Image (tube, rainbow, N blue to C red):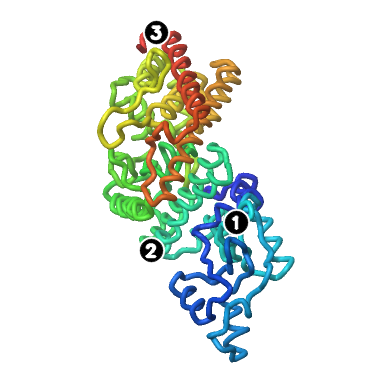
C-alpha cells in the first residue's frame, strides 16, 4: 500500500510560518463605540455569531470584549448589563499587523495567554484573528487532513472531511506555494481519499479474491491535481482473475470507490475512464493487449487513450502489477518511431492562444468569451510535449517536471529548453491555481478560464512569453518528427 501523506518539507508550504495573517481574516471587523450597553453588545455578538467585539471610536481602537469577559466580568460578578462595555473591556489590546505571519499571532497568544488579537492595517482595524482560526489553519494542512481522512469510518465522514480540500488550495495559494508542490499536495489528498474508500469497501465486501492495483491516471496520476478535477482511474487485476467467480466483487468495489469519490467532489469522468467501467477494470494480460493495440494502430482514439493511461501512478494494492505493465509499454514505445510521430501530431492539436503578431487570442462568445483557457491551451500542450520526450527517452517518470528533467538527462532536449518549459509550466499553473482560489473565495466554482484583465501589465507580458515558449517548442518537435504535422 502506498503512503499518500506528502513529506513534511512539502507540507511546510501551508504551515503557520508561511501563512499571512490576512488569509485568516474572513470578515470585516465587528465594532461598537465605548458607551454601548453590555446587553446590546451581547446581542450584537449573538446576531453576528462572533466571540468578540472591538471597541472603536472615530477610527481609533480602544479595546475589545470577548464572550469570556461577559461570563467572568458580568454574569459571574452580577454586573448591571446597562453599564457601558468600556468598563469590562481589555483596553489597549495587543495587536498584529495585517502582513505579519500567522505564526507571529500564535506566539503572541501563547506568550500572553490571550485568544483574540485585533488585526491592523496602517493604523486602521482590519479584523480579528482568534486561537480558533489558527487551529482551523492547522486542521487544513495536508498532513492533518490526510490523517483525518484515515480516521473516517463512513463515506459521509469522508465527504464532510473532503470539504476542506478547497480551503487547502486557497491556503496554498495565499502562502505562495509553488504549483509543483500544490499539485503534489492536492493529489496526495485524493490518494488518501481513494485508499480509505478502498479500505472501507473491503471491510464491507470482504478481502479481495485476487490481487489488484488501483491506479490513478490523468492529473492525479501526474501529481498535478487542482480543486477543479474529475476522475481518471483504473484497476489492473492479477491474471488469476476469473470473471465468473470474481467479477461481481470487483464491480461492486470499484463502483463503491468511484461513487464515493464523486460524492467527495471528484465528478465522474465524462468519458467514463474509471475503474467502475468494465473496460478499464481488467487483468494484466488484457491491459498488455490494450497498449499493444494502441501503439500498433495509433488512430485518434488510441492516441487519446494512450495520453490518459500512459500517465498512470500506483495508489493502492499490489504495485508490481503496474510496474510490470509500465516496463513493457515503455520498451515498446521507445522502439516505435512511427508511434512517436503520431504522438507528436496529437500533441500539436492544442495550440497556445497567440496570434501571428504574438498577441493573446481570446475565446469569442459563449460562457467563457473574452478569456484564455489556461489548461487546454497552455498547460496541456506542455504536458503533451513532456510525455513525448519521456516516451522517446524510455523514462518511467509520470510527473511533467520529472519527465522533462529525465529527458534532459537523456539528451532528448537541451537544458535551456527544459528551463524555459518548466518556467512556463510553473507560471501557467500558478496563474490557474490563484484564479481558482479567487473564484472559490468569491463563492464560485473553480474553472480554468482567465480574463486577462485580472492580471497586471507585467503579468500579461509573462503570460504571452510562456505561450510563446510553448509554441516555439511545438515547432521544434514538429520539425524533428516532420510527418506529425
Q: Name the residue rendered at 61%, 79% in the picture.
A: 69
Give neighbour class at mark 1: few <14, some 14-19, many 20+ (Cα, 10 Å). few
Going from the N terminus, do you reach mark 3 or mark 1 first?
1
Query: SS at mark 1?
Result: strand
Residue sticking out furthest to the right? 111
**Visible residue check, residue 339:** no
Task: Give whichever of 413, 337 is nearer the camera.
Answer: 413
**Label 3, label 2: how many angstroms apart (C-alpha)?**
53 Å
Going from the N terminus, do you reach mark 1 or mark 2 first?
1
Quadrant of res 9: top right
The mark closer to the camera, 1 or 2, is 1
Residue bearing mark 3: 482
103 left or right, relative to 277: right
Residue bearing mark 2: 156
Which numbered marker is on residue 425?
none
Query: SS at mark 3?
Result: helix
**Label 1, label 2: how many angstroms apart (C-alpha)?**
43 Å
Which numbered marker is on residue 124?
1
Task: Give whichever of 459, 474 is nearer the camera.
Answer: 459
**Visible residue check, residue 395:** yes
Q: Name the residue rendered at 45%, 53% in the picture.
A: 193
Going from the N terminus, do you reach mark 3 or mark 2 first?
2
**Is the C-beta separation of discs 1 and 2 under 8 Å?**
no
x, y percentage for residue 215?
43, 42
Query: SS at mark 2?
Result: helix
Q: Name the residue rendered at 36%, 40% in the picture.
A: 283
Amino acid at each position: 500500500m502506498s503512503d499518500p501523506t506528502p513529506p513534511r518539507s512539502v507540507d511546510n508550504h501551508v504551515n503557520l510560518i508561511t501563512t499571512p495573517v490576512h488569509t485568516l481574516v474572513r470578515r470585516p471587523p465587528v465594532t461598537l463605540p465605548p458607551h454601548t450597553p453590555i446587553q446590546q453588545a451581547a446581542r450584537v455578538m449573538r446576531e453576528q455569531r462572533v466571540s468578540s467585539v472591538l471597541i472603536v471610536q472615530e477610527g481609533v481602537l480602544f479595546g475589545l470584549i470577548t464572550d469570556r469577559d461577559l461570563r467572568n466580568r458580568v454574569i459571574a460578578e452580577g454586573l448591571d448589563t446597562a453599564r457601558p462595555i468600556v468598563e469590562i473591556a481589555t483596553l489597549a489590546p495587543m495587536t498584529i499587523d495585517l502582513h505579519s505571519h500567522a505564526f507571529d499571532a500564535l506566539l503572541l497568544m501563547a506568550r500572553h495567554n490571550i485568544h483574540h488579537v485585533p488585526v491592523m492595517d496602517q493604523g486602521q482595524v482590519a479584523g480579528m484573528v482568534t486561537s480558533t482560526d489558527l487551529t482551523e489553519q492547522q486542521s487544513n494542512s495536508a498532513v492533518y487532513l490526510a490523517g483525518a481522512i484515515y480516521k473516517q469510518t463512513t463515506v459521509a465522514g469522508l465527504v464532510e472531511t473532503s470539504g476542506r480540500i478547497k480551503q487547502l488550495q486557497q491556503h496554498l495559494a495565499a502562502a505562495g506555494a509553488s504549483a509543483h508542490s500544490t499539485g503534489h499536495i492536492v493529489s496526495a489528498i485524493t490518494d488518501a481519499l481513494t485508499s480509505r474508500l478502498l479500505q472501507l469497501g473491503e471491510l464491507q465486501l470482504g478481502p479481495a479474491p485476487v490481487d489488484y492495483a488501483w491506479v490513478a491516471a490523468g492529473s492525479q496520476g501526474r501529481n498535478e491535481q487542482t480543486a477543479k478535477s474529475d476522475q481518471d482511474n483504473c484497476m489492473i487485476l492479477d491474471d488469476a482473475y476469473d470473471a465468473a467467480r470474481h467479477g461481481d466483487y470487483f464491480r461492486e468495489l470499484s463502483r463503491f470507490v468511484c461513487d464515493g469519490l464523486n460524492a467527495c467532489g471528484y465528478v465522474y469522468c465524462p468519458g467514463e475512464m474509471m475503474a467502475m467501467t468494465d473496460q478499464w477494470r481488467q487483468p494484466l494480460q488484457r491491459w498488455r493487449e490494450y497498449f499493444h493495440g494502441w501503439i500498433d494502430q495509433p488512430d485518434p482514439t488510441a492516441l487519446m487513450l494512450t495520453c490518459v493511461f500512459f500517465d498512470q501512478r500506483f495508489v493502492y494494492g499490489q504495485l508490481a502489477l503496474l510496474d510490470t505493465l509500465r516496463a513493457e509499454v515503455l520498451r515498446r514505445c521507445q522502439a516505435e518511431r512511427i508511434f512517436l510521430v503520431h504522438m507528436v501530431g496529437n500533441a500539436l492539436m492544442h495550440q497556445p492562444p497567440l496570434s501571428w503578431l504574438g498577441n493573446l487570442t481570446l475565446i469569442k462568445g459563449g460562457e467563457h468569451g473574452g478569456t484564455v483557457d489556461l489548461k487546454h491551451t497552455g498547460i496541456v500542450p506542455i504536458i503533451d510535449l513532456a510525455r513525448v520526450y519521456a516516451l522517446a527517452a524510455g523514462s518511467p517518470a509520470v510527473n511533467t517536471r520529472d519527465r522533462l528533467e529525465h529527458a534532459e538527462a537523456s539528451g532528448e532536449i537541451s537544458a535551456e529548453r527544459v528551463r524555459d518549459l518548466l518556467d512556463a509550466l510553473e507560471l501557467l499553473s500558478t496563474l490557474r491555481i490563484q484564479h481558482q482560489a479567487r473564484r472559490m473565495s468569491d463563492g464560485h466554482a473553480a474553472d480554468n478560464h482567465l480574463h486577462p484583465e485580472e492580471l497586471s501589465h507585467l503579468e500579461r507580458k509573462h503570460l504571452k512569453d510562456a505561450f510563446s515558449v510553448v509554441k516555439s517548442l511545438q515547432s521544434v518537435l514538429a520539425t524533428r518528427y516532420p510527418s506529425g504535422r
